[in-house]
Image (cartoon, rainbow, N blue to C red):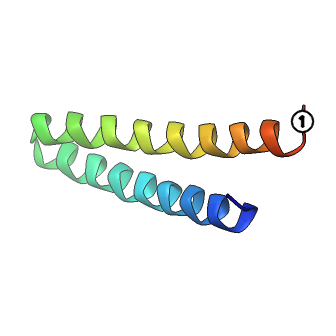
Amino acid sequence: MTLGLVGFISISLIILCFFFTLSFIENLLEGDKRVAIQSRIAAIVCLGLSLFILFSFLLVAYDL
């Protein structure tokens, strides 16, 4: 994998994280707790995956 592909995947996951965060806030204000919890978990997973992918690629690519 090249840095371009890793960057694209990571940026896509960060955009999804932002979307799920906005969905979480919207559902929390509407009072739909089940969907709000699911959106919060999805946002955390997307952010964690994007940071993990970047960090692991940097460790492998630059042999740190």
Residue at 12 percent across and 49 percent down: it is 30
Q: Residues within 10 Å of mark 1 (few under 14, many from 20)?
A: few
Residue at 37 percent across and 49 percent down: it is 21
Residue at 72 percent across and 44 percent down: it is 57
Query: What's the residue type where badge 1 is placed?
Result: Asp
Name the side, left or right, on which 24 lies relative to 60.
Answer: left
Of 61 and 15, which appears nearest the observer?
61
SS for tag 1?
loop
Residue 38, placed above or below residue 16? above
Of 59 and 51, which appears nearest the observer?
59
Residue at 44 percent across and 56 percent down: it is 18
Picture quadrant of residue 46:
top left
Residue 26 position in % (x across, y down): 23, 53
Name the side, left or right, on which 31 lies relative to 20.
Answer: left
Q: Quadrant of the N terminus?
A: bottom right
Picture quadrant of residue 52:
top right
The outermost residue toward the front is 1
Residue 50 position in % (x across, y down): 56, 46
Q: Quadrant of the C terminus?
A: top right
Residue 22 position in % (x across, y down): 34, 55
Total labels: the figure holds: 1
Residue 50, placed above or below residue 16? above
Residue 14 position in % (x across, y down): 52, 55
Of 34 and 46, which appears nearest the observer?
46
Residue 24, placed above or below residue 40? below
On the image, numbered disc 1 is attached to which residue? 63
Of 2 and 17, which appears nearest the observer?
2
